[in-house]
């Protein structure tokens, strides 16, 4: 799942031998039709450590440009580009409830606020559009 144009969140690795970063780059291109010039790791979380060993890993991607899409034939994908602060508003309203998306969005906000992202990116993320 790719949430907004800046944050690449929840990735699905089809092959357990695939490097997670290679997987998220592939998913960004296949599902959102984007490639990124820059990446920053955002989260590495245990999804439910009492019943599974699944790890959720997310990255923030920027310097985006178009890439050919190649979704799995069984997938139906709708991509919506949303300003970052609008995503945070929707999370606050309870419209966006996917746990990894919510956690990544809040982590990205924190990274922007405390200087863990390039200043120009942080300013773009935190600027109200429209």
Image (cartoon, rainbow, N blue to C red):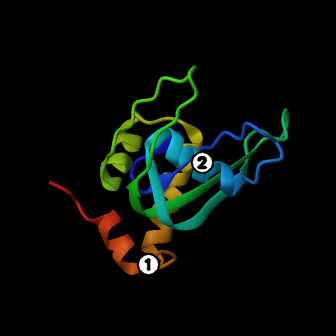
Q: Nearer the viewer, residue 8 or 107?
A: 8
Vertical relation: 110 (above or below) 80: below
Instruction: Name the one closer to the observer, 100 or 22.
Output: 22
Q: Which of marks 1 and 2 is nearer the N terminus?
A: 2
Horizontal side, residue 39 vs residue 12: left or right = left
- Relative side of 15 to 110, left or right: right
Q: Residue 30 carries which label?
A: none
| Along the line of sight, the residue nearer the viewer: 24 or 58 | 24
Residue picked out by circle 2: 26
The residue shown at (61%, 54%) is 58
- Locate the C terminus and report the quarter of the image it occupies: bottom left
Percent position of residue 104, x then y? 54, 53
- Find residue 84 and report its image quarter: bottom left
Label 2: which secondary element: helix
Q: How far apart are the two marked residues, 1 and 2, measured between alpha carbons?
A: 24 Å
Which secondary structure, mark 1? Answer: loop
Pick out the residue farthest to the top: 74
Sort mark 2 into few (<14), some (14-19) or many (20+) by Cα contacts within 10 Å.
many
* Point 72% across, 53% down: residue: 20
Residue at image point 56% right, 22% down: 73
Q: Residue 85 location in percent, x, y?
A: 32, 54
Camera-near label (1 vs 2) is: 2
In the displayed structure, would residue 69 be above or below residue 113?
above
Residue tagged 1: 118
Foreground pick, 96 / 14: 14
- Outermost residue, front direction? 68
In the rendered image of this protein, does residue 42 appear above or below residue 29? below
Q: Label 1 crowding class (10 Å Cα cut-off): few <14, some 14-19, many 20+?
A: few
Pinpoint residue 116: horizontal percent, then vertical percent. 52, 76
Location of residue 33 by image quarter: top left
Q: Residue 56 location, x and y as percent?
A: 69, 47
């Amino acid at each position: 799942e790719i949430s907004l144009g800046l944050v690449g969140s929840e990735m699905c690795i089809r092959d357990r031998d695939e490097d997670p970063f290679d997987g998220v780059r592939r998913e960004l291109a296949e599902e959102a039709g984007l490639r990124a010039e820059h990446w920053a790791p955002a989260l590495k979380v245990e999804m439910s450590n009492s019943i599974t060993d699944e790890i959720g890993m997310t990255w923030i991607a920027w310097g985006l440009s178009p890439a050919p899409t190649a979704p799995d034939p069984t997938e139906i994908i709708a991509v919506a580009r949303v300003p970052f602060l609008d995503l945070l508003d929707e999370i606050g309203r309870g419209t966006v409830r996917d746990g990894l998306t919510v956690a990544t969005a809040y982590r990205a906000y924190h990274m922007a606020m405390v200087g863990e992202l390039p200043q120009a990116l942080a300013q773009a993320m935190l600027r109200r559009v429209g």
